[in-house]
Image: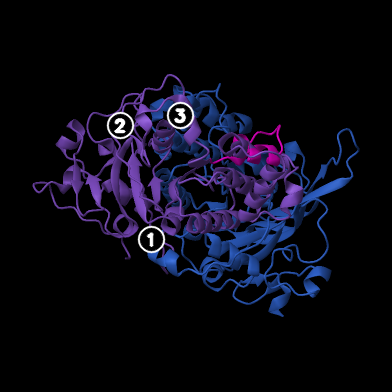
Amino acid sequence: MIHASPNPPSAPLVEAQNLCKYFPVRARFFGKSRHLLKAVDGVSFAIEKGETFGLVGESGCGKTTVGRTLVRLYEPTAGAIRYDGQDISHLNRAALLPFRRRAQMIFQDPYASLDPRMTVGDIIAEPLRVQNLYPGKARDARARELLALVGLKPDHINRYPHEFSGGQRQRIGLARALAGNPEFIVCDEPISALDVSIQAQVVNMLEALQDQFGLTYLFVSHDLTMVRHISRRVAVMYLGAIVELAPVAVLYKHMQHPYTQALLSAAPVADPRRAAQAARIPLQGDVPTPIDPPPGCLFRGRCPKAVPRCAQERPALRDLGGGHLCACHLLE
Amino acid sequence: MQAVRGVTLRVAEGETVGIVGESGSGKSVLMLSLLGLLPDNAQVRAQAMRFADGDLGAMSGREKRRLLGSRIGMVFQDPMTSLNPLFTVEQQLTEPLRIHQGLRGAKARARALDLLRMVDMPSPENRLKQYPHEFSGGMRQRVMIAIAIACGPRLIIADEPTTALDVTIQAQILDLLRNLQKELGTSTILITHDLGVISSMCRRVVVMYGGIVAEEGSLDEIFYSPRHPYTWGLLRSIPEAETEHRLPLVPIPGSPPDMLAPPQGCPFAPRCRHAMPVCLRCAAPETELSPTHKVRCHLTHPAAPQVRWEKEGL
């Protein structure tokens, strides 16, 4: 298991510095794009080698965009991504190729992320073909080996994705990600499309593979209980920014940000006695749109504790000690 | 394909019953067959289907439709596909009022406005004229609930009502359903795969697997003294929330049965670590453990090996 000290002194494997990703949106049909959707707006964190870093938040908070930008499926609008000390923020396609072998991604929807016209063997071997690894017969053998590694039968390489269940497809996606022996995998909601009993299978497999290969994960999810189970440190996002970041035990016991408090109290507890005791902090309204967000704290419209200052000034992440960061004016 | 086999379900006045099960367990098909909403190639056979004092089995399609939307309200998972994008919320809210209660014009509009207030819709006057796409997911689900309660139903069937929503919005909608139920005294059938939602909403739980009821009981019986290995598996698959040190999850091996060729014996036997030869051959009879707690498992037979539920850390 990977339970070292919460903040090992080693250099981070992946680092985001003031990362921003904006998307232009059109206000009217045929109009010129005038507005910016600030999906990620000034996010900074570092992921240590061998840890699982959890990223939670509601839909539209930018957690998926952070994951995709970290592995350079998107180019950041501003800020920097450093991977193992190297700035990869604006590398071109060819220059990214060596990085692609080291950092991979698994996706939420196991039905959409596998090409239905390719055999499972071809799907798994595709990254090897692109990277020109395991040439000739070795490639087939590697695909069989990977299938066995994720708990499927090596003979399945000639089958097509539709012959597999959701959980099995997610294993195929995992085998594809592992093909080139990566160090870092972004897991974007890898279990949310799966049934409860299958979720546990996939999470256990992710943990076993981490132990076996020393993998580093960014685990993006809205499932707060599963994130608590799998992560060492967790960041909470709201409307494109990190509002709180802490080691998992600190975040779930001593959360300071009003949004984290409300979010964690809203998560249903699968234990009737505890659910009856739990006090919920109700939040009014919906998440506002990240298109041209107003100044001030982004959460203030729904915050039960907002003060006038929250409307004027956006709070910065403040270090509370012990690796616990929180962005809220009330903590001063 | 046999999606549901031999299911008995009773819902008392004012009660909330939760139905849990994984995809393909038959929980939605069960509800749709009660309501006669299945496609034409479906065959429904049942000894009895009763609602209040009417016999659903003997009703014609027309009679059933009169019941639906007036005495039985439905809330579906995806409010975007269950609301009609071409009609305003007012048109969709007043439709059941017109059909079932003969309300028209200003009277219907006033009642629609009342309903939107009951589901805590902000500025309901402006919202009436809007189309579903102008609402967020949570607000659309509030509209769905307003339509479901429009004619004062005795039963609300909610099929995964919060699965598509974020946790903070889910909490709002569950609060709303709970409060409405207290106010109106309706019975509720809540279909969900989320044991967290079940434990905060229901008094009685029905666990379905492979088209049958594997176990049913009170909330405490299901969560603290479950007797079916599938229920054990479900409870062990979710992470323990409050422990200091992390415990490994215990998943259920394998995958759910193929209902095109339903297994001969207990549908869970191929995935069950306690399965005996008899489990593969014949289905288990229902055993009554208490007036509320019933289970279908051969392990409850006196001659079967004694296997006990124990969740590590409890």
Chain A drawing hue: blue
Q: Position of residue A8 (x, y in %)?
A: 56, 67
Q: Position of residue A134 (x, y in %)?
A: 53, 31
Residue B199 as seen in the image, left or right of residue A100? left
Chain hosting mark 3: B
Mark 2 or mark 1: name the one nearer the start of the chain.
Answer: 2
Chain hosting mark 1: B
Residue in the image at 43% along x and 30% along y: A144
Residue B101, above or below B2: below
Q: Position of residue A207 (x, y in %)?
A: 45, 52
Q: Which residue is mark 2?
A: B5
Asked if residue B82 lies in the magenta stretch, the reply is yes
Q: Which residue is mark 3?
A: B63
Q: Amino acid at mark 1?
A: Leu
Q: Position of residue A69 (x, y in %)?
A: 70, 47
Chain B drawing hue: purple
Region rendered in magenta: B76-94
Q: Which residue is mark 1?
A: B247
Q: Of the residues tagged 2 and 1, which is closer to the observer?
A: 2
Q: Nearer the viewer, residue B64 or A5?
A: B64
Mark 1 or mark 3: name the one nearer the start of the chain.
Answer: 3
Residue in the image at 59% along x and 36% along y: B82
Residue B171, above or below B18: below
- Judging from the image, what secondary structure is the residue with disc 1 in? loop
Q: Nearer the viewer, residue B150 or B278?
A: B150
